[in-house]
Image: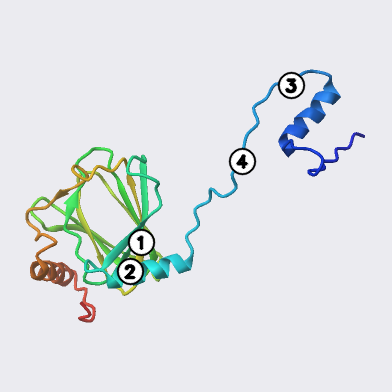
């Protein structure tokens, strides 16, 4: 039985290098290899403190939402981010015309209403995301008008979308919906959509 004792204080070789040298001695053959450096700090961890901090930033934001990017750059082929949203935040209905642009929403905390519209601005489908009901996620097909409405305080979603992200061509806004800068129009639009589905919540925005 052959044993291997690795003494880090007596060698500058990495454990991987020493293992290869050990097996080379056993076999009598020269072994050519590439030494790999393993980074054990590559796991991106999303903890409750980060979620709470993101919600606080959303509450303090004029837009009542705040996102935290998980992807490393706009060129990533898969865009991933956490999105904290408060009731009253308005995301103007839009669509992603590029044929591969799918978009997935998954509830992390709180409750969301996801709406799809036809070309005339009428609701064609809807889905309420809530951990209470087990409705955890929904995927929007490319070229579909849609928006998301936060129904509870401190709501947070995970969004995943095909990349890369180009701000000039990423989305097309619906001309039948008010601009985000139209505060009064946006509130009326949100109330109207909720009313069509019989969804009401306290006037907290």
Picture quadrant where residue 82 is located: bottom left
Nearer the observer, 121 or 49: 49
Determine the CA span between mark 3 and mark 1.
50 Å
Q: Which residue corresponds to the image point at 21% horizontal and 73% vertical from the top-left?
A: 199
The residue to which callout 3 is attached is 31
Q: Which residue corresponds to the image point at 31% horizontal and 75% vertical from the top-left?
A: 153
Mark 4 falls on what kind of element?
loop
Q: From the viewer's perspective, is the residue at label 3 or at label 1 nearer?
A: 3
Mark 3 falls on what kind of element?
loop
Picture quadrant where residue 123 is located: bottom left
Residue 102 image point, x, y percent: 29, 45
Give the quadrant of the N terminus.
top right
Mark 3, Cα crowd under 10 Å, few <14 / some 14-19 / many 20+, is: few
Does any portion of residue 131 appear in the rendered image?
no
Residue 181 image point, x, y percent: 11, 63
Instruction: Name the mark on residue 157.
Output: 1
Determine the CA span between mark 3 and mark 2.
55 Å
Mark 1 falls on what kind of element?
strand
Determine the CA span between mark 2 and mark 4.
35 Å
Q: Which residue corresponds to the image point at 13% horizontal and 70% vertical from the top-left?
A: 187
Determine the CA span between mark 4 and mark 3.
20 Å
Q: From the viewer's perspective, is the residue at label 1 or at label 2 nearer?
A: 2
């Amino acid at each position: 039985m052959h044993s291997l004792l690795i003494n880090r204080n007596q060698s500058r070789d990495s454990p991987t290098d020493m293992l290869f040298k050990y097996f080379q001695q056993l076999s009598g053959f020269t072994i050519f290899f590439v030494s790999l450096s393993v980074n054990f700090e590559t796991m991106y961890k999303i903890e409750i403190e980060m979620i709470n901090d993101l919600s606080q930033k959303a509450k303090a934001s004029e837009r009542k939402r705040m996102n935290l990017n998980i992807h490393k750059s706009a060129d990533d082929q898969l865009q991933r981010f956490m999105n904290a949203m408060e009731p009253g935040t308005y995301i103007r209905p839009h669509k992603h015309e590029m044929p591969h642009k799918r978009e997935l929403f998954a509830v992390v905390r709180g409750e969301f209403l996801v709406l799809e519209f036809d070309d005339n601005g009428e609701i064609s489908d809807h889905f309420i995301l809530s951990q209470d009901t087990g409705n955890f996620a929904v995927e929007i097909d490319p070229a579909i008008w849609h928006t998301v409405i936060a129904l509870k305080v401190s709501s947070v979603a995970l969004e995943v979308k095909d990349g890369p992200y180009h701000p000039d061509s990423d989305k097309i806004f619906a001309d039948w919906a008010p601009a985000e800068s139209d505060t009064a129009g946006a509130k009326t639009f949100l109330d109207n959509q909720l009313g069509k589905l019989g969804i009401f919540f306290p006037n907290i925005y």
